[in-house]
Image (spheres, rainbow, N blue to C red):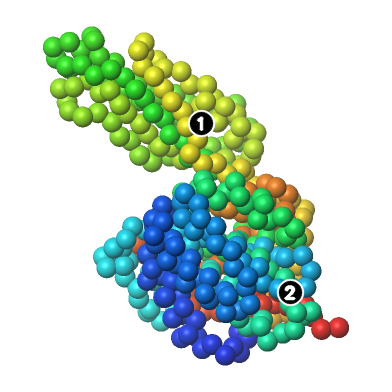
Amino acid sequence: MTTSSTAHAADHSSDDIIALVRELVLIETPSRDRDASALIAELVATHFSAVGGHVERVTTEAGTDLVIDVPGTGAPLLLIGHTDTVWPRGTLDAEVPWTIDGDIVRGPGAYDMKAGIVVMLETLRELQELPLDRRRAVRVVLVSDEEIGSPASGPLLAARADGAVAAIGFESPHPDGALKVGRRGSARVRLSVTGRAAHAALDPEHGVSAVDELVDQLLRVRRLTEDPALPGPVLCNVGTISGGARTNVVSAQAEAEIGLRFVDPDTEHRVLGALAALRPVRDGARLSVEVLSARPAWQASAQDADLLDRIARAGATIGQTVDGRPAAGAGDTNLLGGLGLPTVDGFGPRGGGAHAVDEHFLRSSLHERIALLRAVLTIPAE
């Protein structure tokens, strides 16, 4: 758990820092909206340039990623975040308006994870007062497609992490403020079925129902993911189903998207292999199984524990108690932890309601995280 401390006295007031979060939140950035992604990337790039960052803009099919190198001493510490949110444009004017009520700050994407970006930015701004030999080199990577599994940015992450000494993710922490060390693997899979259309009453025998085939395949998926012989448990959620046209037509097309979560790599490989081996039940039906995105299970290593210990020791110097434990949700840190890079996640402020209409973060926790990151990035004077 992280307990509060007196934050470093910065030139920016608390209101200035919250105003920066608001500036980012007011640019609504749903995943795959390339125009919105370019807009927020330009704003964020301007702010990071102002704190000494060398900014590289990387355009992908999903949007604009940012790779920002900030000078300091030693191999860079990687700070990982994302600019996309789950919310469609118009959410600010409808379900989740920007509001501040005491310590609670609300807005679409404020908690997940634009406040986390501000933790990075404000900390680096404060560190500008120190000479280079008193602050650690930093590389910030902000991607535009994390909320959909990082299909475009994920394959680039290993190259962007090259030479980094460790990685810190700025997703939300556990509710009590604990960091996340280890995450479940995740995959998004699409099952697509092609059948054959026919009149449902006059000649149904000439049709092949894609909807019926999909239903049977989803029952197979349930049996696969609930198999007690699997090494570990699987969370399986059929998120969307679509297909068919009218009740008097045998459906020719149907599909479902499925979200899967895995505790360990062996279970992940076995389940994804079994899904790839699915074959149609009905003569004349065609089945396609496509993995839309995949993040490997990240099982905490001794190196991750050492990184957490270093962060905890830095926190102790400013009166904060820091600990960590595994988390159910997946993120880009899965990719880094899976590569063997010492990694922790959950460095964003405390709050709640990620992906829900009560999304919010705690203003006090924002300042705690800025103070903690400053302690982590500061090299003590000899």
In the rendered view, does 89 fall on the left or right side of 338?
left
The amino acid type of the residue labelled 2 equals Gly
Question: In the rendered structure, are the residues bearing label 2 and label 1 in contact, judged by CB atoms less than 8 Å apart?
Answer: no
Where does the image place residue 108, in percent across and percent down from the top left?
38, 65
Q: Secondary structure at mark 1?
A: helix
Residue 360 appears in the picture as rendered: no
Camera-nearest residue between 309 and 197:
197
- The quarter of the picture where residue 269 lies is top right
**Placement of 72 over or under 261, stated as above or below:** below
Q: Residue at x 49, y 58 (%)?
A: 64
The amino acid type of the residue labelled 1 equals Thr
- The quarter of the picture where residue 303 lies is bottom right
In the rendered view, does 51 fall on the left or right side of 190?
right
Q: Which mark is residue 225?
A: 1
Residue holding disc 2: 72
In the rendered view, does 163 fall on the left or right side of 128?
right
Where does the image place residue 352, in percent across and percent down from the top left?
45, 64
Answer with mark 2 or mark 1, whichever residue precedes in sequence. Answer: 2
Farthest residue toward the right? 382
Q: Quadrant of the C terminus?
A: bottom right
Residue density around tag 2, few if under 14, some if 14–19, many if 20 or more, within 10 Å: many
Camera-nearest residue between 250 and 219:
250
Q: Residue at x 43, y 37 (%)?
A: 258
Q: Residue at x 66, y 83 (%)?
A: 128
Where does the image place residue 346, in percent across and percent down from the top left?
58, 62
Distance from Cα at disc 2 to Cα at disc 1: 47 Å
In the rendered view, does 313 fall on the left or right side of 297?
right
